[in-house]
């Protein structure tokens, strides 16, 4: 089977209290459909958790408006550790999560009026689209961006959907492009700008000179969940003024406080493994066969980008459509490029948490 990147499945977010922050994500982003909730040990991730097996609870939630979901992740065997330094623009790793909005101005007003910590005002991207930054109660920064594709109109007043991509701090954009453009298919450059940007002025070290490149995928994504996950973009940011950039997860574990990984829904794991190896990004973790997540199952793997940022791949084998009735779909019995029917994907919305 060939390599198929179906879309961003989720942004992993390490938190001190899953249920508390998920209430906030439901209120401000409308990410209110629970796909699974699983408490277990993470024995395959010991190379990123101090060579010890740690326990955790994880909730995968998404919005039926479309976009990727959140895997909201909390250690249960230890405290969730914050970075011991202030994370700043240009530091290496998943710095900002992009959230899709079909009406950015309306999203801005909704968040302001309902008490979210909005960072500055409405600004414009280098290619003229409105956007703004907002910070969650744990200090994670989200960039609300224009994306008019909608899977289902949920009438959410904030006009937002799920994950529309990410902003990643890198040490060298050209080297990072080998992964994000060549392997992951974000080969279209939407803009490539260098300077000091007004829209970054409210971010820590946002007054420093950077190069920023926004990448998109020219081909429409295919696969079982592609219509729901939708199009996404990745912005690479390289600081040109700072000499003190740090890895965001320096001296911390995967699963600690912040954006812990970017996860892609894929088909054809063996072909992807070969492609990653040939391009210098070998799998660092591979579950092999089917890894059971309680209510879901699949094969997962991880690679590191050139600065050590963790990228996860999940080849879904089993997913709950309507848990109350015990209704699951076996993805392995379907064509890898074939999307699940819209009515089936929409049925997942019956797992909504109000």
Image (spheres, grey):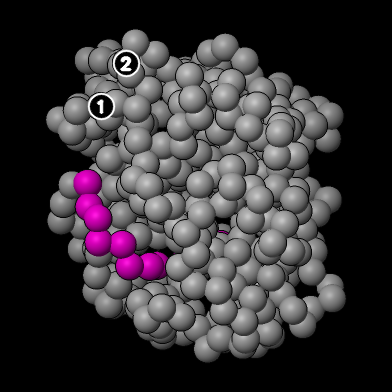
Residue drawn where x is 55% and y is 74% of the image: 192
Residue drawn where x is 59% and y is 37% of the image: 312
Q: Position of residue 346 (x, y in %)?
A: 19, 35
Q: Position of residue 251 (x, y in %)?
A: 83, 51
Residue drawn where x is 39% and y is 13% of the image: 332
Between discs 2 and 1, the one toward the N terminus: 2
> What element does badge 1 sit on?
loop
Asked whether residue 110 is in view, the answer is no
Residue 135 vertical position relative to residue 316 in the rendered view, above or below: below
State yes or no: discs 2 and 1 in contact (Cβ < 8 Å): yes
Asked whether residue 335 is in view, the answer is yes
Residue 52 vertical position relative to residue 234 in the rendered view, above or below: above
Count residues near mark 2 (Cα–Cα under 10 Å), then give few for <14, some for 14-19, many for 20+: some
Closer-to-camera residue (45/225) = 225
> What element does badge 2 sit on?
loop
| Residues rendered magenta in the picture | 140-151
Quarter where residue 233 is shown = bottom left
Quarter where residue 320 is shown = top left
Residue 64 vertical position relative to residue 282 in the rendered view, above or below: below
- Which residue is label 1 attached to? 340
Closer-to-camera residue (186/121) = 186
- Which residue is label 2 attached to? 334
Disc assigned to residue 33: none
141 part of magenta stretch: yes
């Amino acid at each position: 089977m060939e390599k198929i990147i179906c879309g961003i499945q989720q942004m992993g977010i390490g938190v001190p209290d899953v249920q508390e922050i998920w209430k906030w994500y439901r209120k401000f982003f409308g990410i209110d459909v629970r796909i699974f909730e699983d408490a277990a040990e993470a024995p395959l991730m010991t190379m990123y958790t101090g060579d010890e097996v740690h326990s955790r609870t994880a909730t995968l939630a998404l919005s039926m408006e479309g976009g990727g979901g959140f895997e909201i992740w909390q250690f249960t065997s230890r405290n969730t550790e914050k970075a011991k330094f202030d994370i700043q623009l240009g530091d290496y790793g998943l710095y900002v999560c992009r959230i899709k909005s079909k009406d950015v101005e309306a999203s801005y007003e909704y968040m302001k009026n309902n008490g979210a910590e909005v960072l500055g005002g409405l600004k414009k991207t280098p290619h003229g689209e409105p956007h703004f930054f907002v910070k969650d109660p744990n200090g994670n920064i989200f960039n609300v961006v224009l994306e008019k594709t909608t899977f289902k109109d949920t009438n959410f007043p904030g006009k937002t959907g799920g994950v529309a991509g990410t902003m990643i701090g890198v040490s060298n954009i050209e080297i990072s492009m080998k992964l994000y453009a060549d392997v992951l298919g974000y080969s279209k450059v939407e803009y490539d700008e260098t300077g000091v940007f007004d829209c970054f002025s409210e971010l820590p070290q946002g007054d420093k000179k950077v190069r920023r490149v926004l990448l998109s995928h020219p081909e429409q994504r295919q696969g079982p969940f592609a219509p729901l996950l939708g199009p996404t973009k990745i912005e690479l940011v390289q600081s040109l003024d700072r000499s003190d950039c740090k890895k965001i997860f320096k001296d911390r574990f995967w699963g600690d406080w912040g954006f812990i990984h970017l996860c892609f829904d894929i088909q054809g794991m063996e072909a992807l493994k070969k492609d990653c190896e040939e391009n210098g990004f070998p799998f660092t973790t591979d579950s092999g066969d089917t890894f059971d997540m309680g209510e879901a199952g699949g094969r997962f793997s991880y690679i590191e980008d050139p600065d050590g940022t963790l990228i996860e791949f999940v080849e879904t084998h089993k997913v709950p459509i309507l848990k109350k009735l015990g209704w699951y779909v076996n993805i392995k019995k379907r064509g890898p490029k074939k999307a699940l029917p819209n009515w089936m994907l929409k049925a997942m919305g019956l797992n909504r948490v109000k």
